Image (cartoon, rainbow, N blue to C red):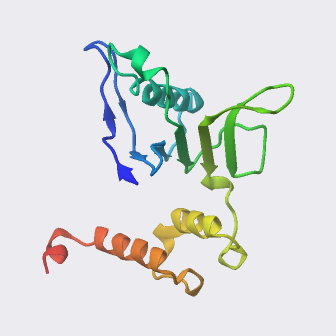
Amino acid sequence: MVYNKNEHPGETVNEGGAIFDLTCTGNDGEEFIIEVQRGKQANFKQRAIFYTSRSISEQAPKGRRSEWAYNVKEVYLIALLEDFSLDTDNDPAFLHDIYLSNRETGKVFYEGLGYIFIELSKFVETGAELDTDLDKRLYVLKNMSSMNKIPVYLRKPIFEKVFNIAEYSNLTKEEKTI
């Protein structure tokens, strides 16, 4: 996994750019855009489409499209929505895995473009109910600010590292130099 630049200027001086929270490239060349949205955002679905479209259009080499032959690398957007919902008709699901498909058959049209929206406000599992690694990760993301220490059921190297980083981030400038 390679972490990429997160600022993507427009093609002209008058065209607005896009700033992603995090972008990275997977081992097979697929691109991931990670967005964390803390508050209600108007048109968030449209913004997700814009971001992935921008990422796809940046793959095209300028002036050499025939050589490229539209060999588009996969692009995925993963959005963590902290305090708002996608307005999904009161759907209690917190995880939405979106892809392009045929409306009539449900058959996948194109697998190389996907959206995962995670609505943390709908994730209500308690520590005792955490079954999967995803559950544990989402629990930490949602509850980190209210935890004083790492719970026993999260004693794994990855979570210990997250807690260590969080503890260090909360130190004052003076405490960091000690």
Q: Which sits in the foreground, 101 or 46? A: 101
Horizontal side, residue 113 vs residue 92: left or right? left
Residue 29 in sight? yes
Q: Nearer the viewer, residue 90 or 4?
A: 4
Q: Position of residue 170 (x, y in %)?
A: 31, 70
- The reply to whether residue 42 is in sight is no
Q: Considering only vertical position in the picture, is 151 above or below 20?
A: below
* Residue depicted at x 46% and y 68%: 145
* Quarter holding residue 104: top right
Point out the image quarter for the N terminus: bottom left
Can you name the residue that lies furthest to the front here? 67
Q: Nearer the viewer, residue 5 or 166?
A: 5
Residue 109: x percent and y percent? 71, 29
Classify 86 as above or below 134.
Answer: above
Indicate the quadrant where residue 66 lies: top left
- Residue shown at 42%/46% (left/top)? 25
Q: Tell me where residue 178 appears, x and y as whole percent.
A: 14, 81
Query: Which residue appears at 55% of the width and 80% of the height?
Result: 154
Picture coordinates of residue 62, whole percent (x, y): 32, 17
Lateral position of residue 95 relative to residue 25, left or right: right
Say above or below: 85 vs 101.
below
